[in-house]
Amino acid sequence: MLLPAPAELAEWLSGLSRIENLTDEPHHFTVLPDGYVKLISIRTPGQSPQLLLSGLWTRAHPVTVPAHVTLTGVQFKLLAAEHLFPTPLPLNAACPLPEDSWLSNVLPSQDLPLAQHLAAHLAPV
């Protein structure tokens, strides 16, 4: 489900999404290209959250959400992503962010909305 970005982050973000797989089976779906760069937090019970940067996609790609995993996505506007992420943006790929990324200090340690934490670091600009 895609939700609009909070007003205070509208300059940077297009939207927010969350996918929870509460079942014992993996959930498979296809993501279509949409012209946005996404920051995805992957939460698995009993493990530290993982951050992925999903770049621009030029084709549909399959996604699998393992059992009992929650994905929280933040959809960045292209110019904002180019400004915030120093490495070249991935094309048709998702890559883990390095542990020394500025986002490692922003990532919530509890199950709180990722957008709240981003708002504290991005707004006002």
Image (cartoon, helix red, strand yellow):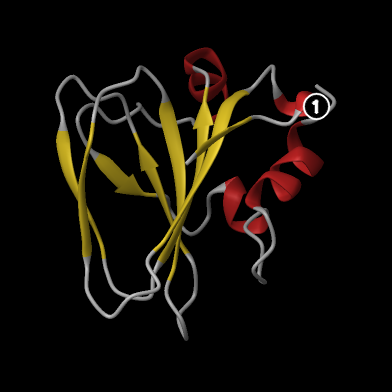
Residue at image point 68% right, 44% down: 115
Secondary structure category for the residue under label 1: helix
Relative horizontal placement of residue 16, taking residue 7 as reference (left or right): left
In the figure, is residue 82 to the left or right of 94? right
- Give the vertical position of 110 relative to 124 (above or below): below
Q: In the rendered image of this protein, does residue 45 appear above or below residue 92?
A: below
Q: Position of residue 120 (x, y in %)?
A: 81, 43
**Which residue is found at the position 56% from the left and 30% from the top?**
15
Q: Position of residue 10 (x, y in %)?
A: 69, 21
Rendered residue at 27%/69% (across/down): 66
Going by the picture, which residue comes out furthest to the top?
Answer: 79
Location of residue 60 in the rendering, given as x and y in whole percent from the top left corner: 15, 29
Q: On screen, 118 above or below 92?
A: below
Which sits in the foreground, 79 or 16?
A: 16
How busy is the neighbourhood of tag 1: few (under 14 within 10 Å), some, or many (20 plus)?
Answer: few
Occupied quadrant, residue 87: top left
Rendered-image quadrant of the C terminus: top right
> Which of these two is toward me, 32 or 97?
32
x, y percent for residue 90: 28, 31
Amino acid type, residue under disc 1 in the picture: Glu
Q: Give the residue number, with chain letter if any, for mark 1.
A: 8
Identify the image quadrant of residue 56.
top left
> Who's the residue at 41% across and 22% down the image?
36
Occupied quadrant, residue 11: top right
